[in-house]
Image (tube, helix red, strand yellow):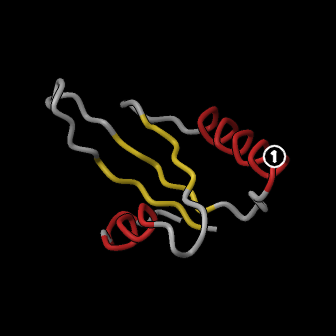
Amino acid sequence: REAFLARRVVKILPEDPCYVLGVVPCVDARGADGIRRLRDLCKAIAQRVIAPFPITILPLRGNGSSVRRKFQALSATRVL
């Protein structure tokens, strides 16, 4: 449904960019089957994303997710 891209500040090798792609899935992520679908979705996205820097795919589940709220607060990060 939504995707957010943000650069993460890291202490080790801060000169190398580290990006996080937060994905709000449209799949039901409840239960063991949901978690499996979510993992498969993240793997599929990771295989299709082409970038000159490493990207970590992070699922953002639930409207109240604290990590999701952090991504949404960075308004310029919304990519989808």
Q: Is residue 63 above or below residue 37?
A: below
Residue located at (35% from left, 42% from top): 19
In the foreground, 18 or 48: 18
Residue located at (51% from left, 35% from top): 50
User: Residue 27 at what x, y percent from top left?
Assistant: 77, 60
In the rendered structure, the answer to whether residue 16 lies left or right of residue 3 reads: left
Image-quadrant location for residue 80: bottom right
User: Residue 59 at what x, y percent from top left?
Assistant: 57, 52
User: Residue 77 at what x, y percent from top left?
Assistant: 36, 63
Amino acid carrying label 1: it is Ala
Specify the farthest residue to the top. 13
Specify the farthest residue to the front. 31
Image-quadrant location for residue 14: top left
Q: Residues within 10 Å of mark 1 (few under 14, many from 20)?
A: few
Q: Quadrant of the N terminus?
A: bottom right
Q: Is residue 27 above or below residue 32?
A: below
In the rendered structure, the answer to whether residue 21 lies left or right of residue 14 reads: right
In the rendered structure, the answer to whether residue 10 lies left or right of residue 76 reads: left
Residue located at (78% from left, 42% from top): 36
Count of labels in the image: 1
- Dot 1 falls on a residue whose secondary structure is helix
User: Residue 68 at what x, y percent from top left?
Assistant: 46, 65
In the rendered structure, the answer to whether residue 8 lies left or right of residue 33 reads: left
In the foreground, 27 or 15: 27
Residue located at (70% from left, 41% from top): 39
Q: Is residue 49 above or below residue 5?
A: above
- Residue identifier under label 1: 32
